[in-house]
Image: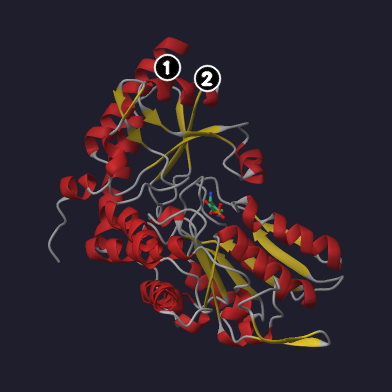
């Protein structure tokens, strides 16, 4: 495939043209939420201008256009992830998706004596729902630890897959360390031991080709807003057998076939898990986002981000007293760092005045930050629409800020 013209790609993102504090914006917070290309903004706008109606309810023309657009977006997403559309539940994002698994799959099944295995690098969205399940069922939580470079200690992980473990919750890519976990092999090991696998794909799907079917997991959650789509969109893929066996999470309209006061007949999956009016325009926008990303090619995006990551890592390595957390060989374009004697919030605040947007804090991963032994870090996260010149501008701004604070 031809190499994309990255300058033209960048020009697809209107927001990247703006300035902040009188400086050109350098947006390095895409792991938090990604910017939106014109194609997504226009798809949402077009939906509201021309097709707006509720889905699956009205027989009129707009109703069928809205339903077609919504279901069409589901099919696009399913193709993008290489899964069946009738196994893809649309929802507000990863947090909802993981809670759906927690409440509909885990809560009715787990009991005292069972264990849930998590890794040290999980986001709170893949920790707290399991704690809530553990509290209600009497199950316990086990944690698989990391090597110093931020990669999973696979021997320890497999050793922790003891008979009482029923479920493994695992990030595909860490939002703090950037570590890409060998999910297919881990799921193979879990499956051999009868452990159900729940993969948090939030930080993977936007940055590399992801073939969910090939991963061999039971559940795969992702969020649309990190994938250049609108906020409040995302999904959960699950094997059909799981979706058939799981009770609904929320009840209401759309998720039923028939309702009587003495009982209701639920709709077929995935609709059984989509109670109420969904974020229709958002899902349509997400469909446009995957069309857009597929047009560039996820392999090209991955290569572009790897080049930006290598450049940024090399330049940051030249700054005295700067430590990078997460140096695993297989790493996404996320750089968490700290500078000796400088608070990360001060760094991020002063970088903002230079036009550079980075995140600082604990990145919704308190257990990981505790393990790193730093209160907080700064996180620069790159996307394909960033440039080498922006990396240089960031590093120059960082040097200036450090001089100010030192
Ligand atoms: N998991 C990971 C690894 C994430 O990075 C995020 C977003 N920061 C989430 C889960 C939660 O995603 P959302 O807020 O879109 O539900």
Image vertical order of residue 239 relative to residue 335, above or below: below
- Element type where label 2 sits in the image: loop
Q: In which quarter of the image is residue 109?
A: bottom right
Residue 310 visible in rendering = no
| Mark 1 vs ligand 1: CB below 8 Å | no
User: Where is residue 108 shown, x and y percent of the image?
Assistant: 79, 76
Distance Cα–Cα, label 1 vs label 2: 8 Å
Which residue corresponds to the image point at 60% horizontal and 58% vertical from the top-left?
95
Disc assigned to residue 402: 1
* Label 2 crowd bin: few (<14), some (14–19), many (20+), radius 10 Å: some
Q: Are marks 1 and 2 in contact (CB under 8 Å)?
A: yes
Disc assigned to residue 362: none
Residue 377 visible in rendering = yes
Which residue corresponds to the image point at 61% horizontal and 62% vertical from the top-left?
96
Which residue corresponds to the image point at 40% horizontal and 65% vertical from the top-left?
284
Q: Which residue lies furthest to the left in this view?
A: 2
User: Where is residue 70 shown, x and y percent of the image?
Assistant: 43, 72
Image vertical order of residue 313 relative to residue 67, above or below: above
Disc nearer the start of the sequence (1/2): 2
Query: 143 or 77, which is in the foreground?
Result: 77
* Label 1 crowd bin: few (<14), some (14–19), many (20+), radius 10 Å: many
Q: Quadrant of the N terminus?
A: bottom left
- Residue indicated by mark 2: 342
Which residue corresponds to the image point at 62% horizontal and 68% vertical from the top-left?
158
User: Where is residue 245 shown, x and y percent of the image?
Assistant: 68, 86
| Mark 2 vs ligand 1: CB below 8 Å | no
Query: 330 or 133, which is in the foreground?
Result: 133
């Amino acid at each position: 495939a031809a190499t994309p013209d990255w300058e033209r790609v960048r020009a697809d993102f209107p927001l990247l043209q703006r300035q902040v504090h009188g400086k050109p914006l350098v947006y390095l917070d895409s792991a938090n939420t990604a910017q939106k290309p014109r194609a997504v903004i226009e798809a949402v706008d077009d939906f509201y201008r021309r097709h707006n109606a509720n889905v699956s309810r009205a027989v009129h023309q707009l109703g069928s256009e809205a339903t077609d657009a919504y279901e069409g977006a589901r099919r696009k997403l399913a193709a993008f992830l290489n899964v069946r559309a009738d196994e893809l539940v649309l929802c507000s994002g990863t947090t909802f998706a993981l809670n759906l698994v927690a409440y509909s799959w885990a809560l009715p099944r787990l009991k005292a004596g069972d264990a849930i295995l998590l890794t040290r690098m999980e986001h709170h969205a893949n920790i707290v729902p399991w704690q809530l399940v553990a509290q209600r069922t009497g199950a316990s939580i086990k944690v698989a630890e990391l090597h110093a470079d931020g990669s999973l200690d696979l021997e320890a992980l497999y050793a922790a897959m003891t008979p009482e473990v029923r479920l493994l919750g695992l990030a595909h890519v860490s939002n703090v360390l950037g570590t890409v976990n060998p999910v297919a092999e881990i799921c193979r090991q879990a499956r051999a031991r009868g452990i159900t696998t729940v993969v948090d794909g939030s930080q993977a799907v936007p940055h590399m080709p992801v073939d969910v079917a090939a991963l061999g997991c039971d559940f795969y959650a992702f969020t649309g807003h990190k994938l250049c789509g609108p906020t409040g969109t995302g999904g959960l893929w699950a094997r059909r057998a799981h979706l058939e066996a799981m009770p609904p999470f929320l009840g209401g309209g759309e998720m039923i076939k028939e309702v009587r006061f003495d009982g209701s007949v639920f709709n077929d999956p995935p609709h059984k898990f989509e109670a109420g009016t969904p974020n229709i325009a958002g899902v349509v926008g997400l469909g446009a986002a995957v069309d857009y990303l597929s047009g560039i090619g996820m392999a090209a995006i991955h290569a572009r981000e790897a080049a930006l990551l290598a450049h940024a890592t090399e330049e940051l390595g030249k700054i005295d007293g700067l430590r990078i957390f997460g140096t695993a060989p297989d790493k996404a374009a996320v750089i968490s760092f700290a500078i000796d004697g400088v608070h990360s919030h001060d760094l991020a605040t002063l970088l903002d005045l230079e036009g550079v947007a980075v995140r600082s804090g604990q990145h919704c991963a308190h257990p990981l930050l505790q393990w790193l032994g730093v209160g907080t870090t700064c996180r620069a996260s790159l996307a394909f629409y960033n440039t080498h010149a922006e990396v240089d501008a960031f590093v120059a701004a960082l040097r200036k800020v450090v001089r100010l604070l030192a």
